[in-house]
Image: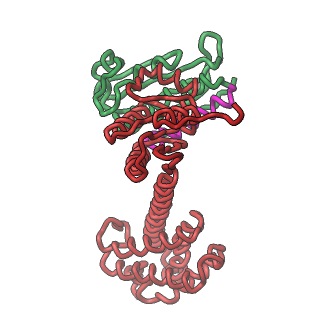
Chain colours: A red, B green
Amino acid sequence: MASDTIDIASILKSDFEKILSAWLRVQAREGIKRTDIISAEETAKQSRDLLSAIARAAEDARVDREFDFGNPAWDGVRQTLGEISKNRTERGVSPTEMAWFVSSLKQAFFTPLRELLSEEPSKLVEQITDATRVVDNFALHAFDCYVQEREAIIERQQSEMTEVSAPVVKIWDRIVTVPLLGTLDSFRAQTVMENLLQAIVEREAEVAIIDITGVSTVDTMVAQHLLKTAAAVRLMGAECVISGISPKIAQTIVHLGVELPNVVTRVDLQSGLAYAFERIGVSTRLNGL
Amino acid sequence: MNDETWTISLRKPADVAHARKIAMQALDAAGASAIVKTRFVTAVSEIARNAIVHASSGVMVIGMGRLNGNRSIIARCEDRGPGIVDTNAALKDGFSTGRGMGLGLGGSKRLVDRFELETRVGEGTTVVLETRLR
């Protein structure tokens, strides 16, 4: 083979199996073959898929200093990297292991390049530089996919938490309550409102108590959400009570300049409930009195 | 006095919650009273959200300082948004260019001991909040 046609595209054509087994050996040597979560067969298959995609793309696209990962010819490689990243993220592979998985391909490329270009050091340096840049681009893409996949997992968990954290409870005949916890962002506020309005219909409730004891900060956005929910509850013919307004929250609301017109507020859930009992005509008394 | 500062990037709504948490931790560590904590954290929440809503992103730096000889907490929020054209109007209750209540800026000012607003139209806005720990 003429030395000026030697690059990673040519060695992938002539020495595919050799490069693949060299890559798998490097992975094993660097200790990144997590046989506990990814079997040797899977690793071998993923490595083969990726290397085949690279070999296919390298037939059409440049792998020298004109290498451009944005070229559509590399779409297949990007897709394969994305699939492998997704698979590995879900299985709990660490970021280091993910990065090494792709980066270790470099060493597998260097060996045949060294053998073929041993007589021409300057060409060898050039080819090693180009191969490094190409593989680094793959590794960075794999890492981007990995992070995106992680973020998607976090988002999924967040929305799952939103669903479970707004349970509307029928606390008494014609009285429903929703205890709010943590942060009340726009999305959660919407979920709370929907759940509460639905419960008012289903439980034929006349009073709805929103308990904010567990909400750490009541700023203008939270206040606005509460007011909107209260207004919607009133439109449905029920009365809305906001309970759990502690002294510090009360002071803060006043300083903010927020007014809560037409909304009954109480310091805690107990007094909120007492008010609701009064509204629906239930009398309470302590035993023995 | 410690020189530790915390930097929070504000890009998405969840970052507002993060800013509140950092402010709360700093105040807890400094031994602030419950009311000081609630007031300051609420102001931080308003200002951090403003940066995201109006400037789409910003950076908040929280640290400890001194105000009139007393230990204090400072939050400085900087964005490169459109700036505020009329600061007097913006500070007035009920004024809003968005869909909020129009109380965040003026309300925050009332919640802290020192409030500074620096803005240049087209360049961005910086808000400084400072409150004595006791």
Q: Is residue B80 above or below residue B109?
A: below
In depth, the one of B103 and A56 nearer the eye is: B103
Asked if residue A126 lies left or right of residue B98, the reply is: right
Whole-percent x, y for residue B98 in the image? 30, 32
| Quadrant containing the N terminus of chain B in the rendered view | top right
Residue B8 visible, this angle: no
Residue drawn at point x = 50 percent, y = 84 percent: A45
Residue drawn at point x = 60 percent, y = 17 percent: B132
Residue drawn at point x = 69 percent, y = 36 percent: A287
Magenta span contains residue A79? no
| Quadrant containing the C terminus of chain B in the rendered view | top right
Whole-percent x, y for residue B61 in the image? 53, 31
Q: Which residues are magenta?
A: B10-31
Residue B68 visible, this angle: yes
Whole-percent x, y for residue A105 in the image? 52, 75
Quadrant housing residue A258: top left
